[in-house]
Amino acid sequence: MGGRLHADTVTLRYDARTISTDLSVSIPDGAFTVIVGPNACGKSTLLRALSRLLMPSAGQVILDGRSIADIPAKKVARRLGLLPQSSIAPGGITVADLVARGRYPHQSFLRQWSKADEEAVVSAMEATRIMDLSARLVDELSGGQRQRVWIAMVLAQQTPLLLLDEPTTFLDIAHQIELMDLLADLNAGGRTIVAVLHDLNQACRYGTHLIAMKDGRILAEGKPSAIVTEDLVDAVFGLPCVIMADPVSNTPLIVPKGRQRHARPG
């Protein structure tokens, strides 16, 4: 399989519960890949396996031609940044100190904190608009603010691969679009992005490669404009819908049919 990151016939399970069997997927280099599907379909489990948080019980995940299980954790963290679905900050840590932890994979006995590390932290905080929060304690922030701090920490790693599990969680709509625009800019600058999203329309607007999952299997993958159809949305989500062109991006726009309602007069 091509690409620097791919899963080769992996079986993924939690204890006795099997999520996916013989699952193979390749993440296209330089793409903005979005994984979509209903709750509990295996999206986050796949992302955990790709990031080495979950070891397959069969098969393997390959990163840069080697089994990711054989690569030291610190080397993986210099190539791949992960924003998990939920993160807990140590008590009493400031925003600036938490973002600075993103530079840990670049530290060693011979290489201590440097100007490059400082610049990476400042750049990440500016990109996520949290510079004014730098001295605040993380546990004093709102959910949306904390989410942006965690994203800044991942950005500070400056890895060529970014994996994000529901990164828009806790963010209001304006900050969601701001974040998705930032990820699109990072992708345009050469980073490979993989994100799990619930919003199908954001997935279609920003993703260059879509992976649609259900029951631990991949039902379809490819460009959103090529694979997103009313039949696919119904098959994946059980959602009757109408698909039209997004008037802003010209990407597929999913309009759920729902229960038919008539407009109220007046």
Image (cartoon, rainbow, N blue to C red):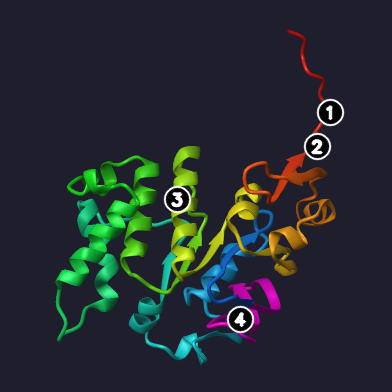
Of pointers 4 and 2, the one earlier in the residue sequence: 4
- Position in image of residue 4 (x %, y %): 53, 83
Residue 18 colored in magenta in the image: yes
Mark 4 belongs to which amino acid? Ala
The quadrant in which the N terminus is found is bottom right
6 is within the stretch colored magenta: yes
Query: Count of labels shown?
Result: 4
The C terminus - image quarter: top right
Q: Is residue 40 left or right of residue 72?
A: right
Q: Which mark is residue 260?
A: 1
Where residue 14 sits in the image (x, y, percent)?
Answer: 58, 71
Q: Residues within 10 Å of mark 2 (few under 14, many from 20)?
A: few
Q: Earlier in the sequence, mark 3 or mark 1?
A: 3
Residue 181 position, x and y percent, is 48, 52
Identify the magenta region.
Answer: 1-25
Tags 2 and 3 touching, CB below 8 Å: no
Disc number at residue 257?
A: 2
Q: Which mark is residue 7?
A: 4
Instruction: Give yes or no for contact between labels 1 and 4 (Cβ–Cβ under 8 Å).
Output: no
* Residues marked 2 and 1 touching at CB (< 8 Å): yes
Q: CA distance from mark 2 to mark 1?
A: 7 Å
Looking at the image, residue 239 lies above or below residue 48: above
